[in-house]
Image (tube, helix red, strand yellow):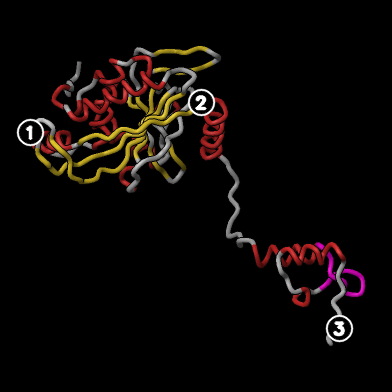
Amino acid sequence: MGEEVKASSEARILAEQYEVDLKRIKGSGPQGEITVQDVEKYIKEHFFPKVKERKPLRGIRRIIASRLSKSYREAVHVTINMEVLMNRLIEFRERIAGRLGYKPSYTILLAKCVAKALREHIDVNAALENDEIIVYDTININIAVDTPFGLITPVLRRVDEKSLEELVREYNDIVGRTRRGLLKEKDVAGGTFTITNLGMLGVDSFTPIINPPQIAVLGVNRMTRKPYVDDEKGEIKIGIFMNLSLTFDHRAIDGAPAARFLQKVKYYLEHPEEISWTAK
């Protein structure tokens, strides 16, 4: 029989939990006795993932983490989803590209539809601060942008009042500066509602986090092609559909008005001809 391994009773109990053969461990205690610390070191090396890098939360990433934590601690998040038929908006985008000489971003087209819906459901265009609901008359939409510095949400101002061409110029400018880390404080201040788009990453549905102190955020998902029944003609057709995910703060707004707002966004996406694409 081999020589019995010297180990403390605590070390033996811990080793048994991980089915560790004590003969594999070199003891650091008196006369080579295996200690709890020896077993813990072995377990850490063999059962836990190897750390490649430790990155402290600092700068913009720390601010983002703080804001998201605040949002989840304080807001009562509820998310509702709604499917939208995108055929007409896609056709509209193709037509207008002929006049503009380029295809405008779907984010800009969506922002105009959202702004129109917000104007008609202005209670969603609001913030909740110090037990007070602040409803804004100005519609400034934050657009979430993925950058090397984290998720940044610069603001497009007075979206409902501007032409499509104006918004495209402003969007291209601010997104470009966001990705290069050239934003100023004014570029992220004063938003009243947020849009975040994960559709380009193949996401079907998600729960966007409210951008405090705002009371709602709209998540945009990928477009997919599938058959559907055209109720007007009673025919089966192929359509391009997209899910919208609206998260709202239930402290400030109830489910029914939030759903009616989302219905209106859906309506304008499906009827883009009813949107004013010129400046007011």
Q: Secondary structure at mark 1?
A: loop
- Quadrant housing the N terminus: bottom right
Q: Which residue is mark 1?
A: 233
* Label drawn at residue 3: 3
Identify the residue at the far bottom of this view: 1
28 relative to 269 in the view: left or right: right
Please state which of residues 78 and 219 is positioned toward the viewer in this rendering: 78
Residue 24 horizontal side relative to residue 222, left or right: right
Label 1 – label 3 distance at C-alpha: 87 Å
Q: Quadrant location of residue 58?
A: top right
* Boundaries of the magenta span: 27-36
Mark 1 or 3, which is nearer the eye?
Answer: 1
- At 25% across and 43% down in the image, what residue appears? 223
Does 233 lie within the magenta span? no
Q: Position of residue 258 (x, y in %)?
A: 37, 22
Q: Nearer the viewer, residue 165 or 252?
A: 252
Q: Measuring 37% from the left and 15% from the top, which residue is drawn there?
A: 123
Task: Give how far across and how far down residue 12 sits, in percent.
Answer: 81, 67
The quadrant holding residue 236 is top left
Residue at horizontal 29 percent and vertical 16 percent from the top:
119
- Mark 1 or mark 2, whichever is nearer to me: 1
Between the residue at mark 2 and the residue at mark 3, the CA separation in whole angstroms equals 63 Å
- 238 sits to left or right of 187: left
Q: Which mark is residue 76?
A: 2
Q: Amino acid at mark 1?
A: Lys
Q: Quadrant of residue 88?
A: top left
Q: Position of residue 117 (x, y in %)?
A: 28, 20
Q: Amino acid at mark 2?
A: Val
Q: Is residue 163 above or below residue 226?
A: above
Mark pair 1, 2: CA separation? 42 Å
Dot 3: element:
loop
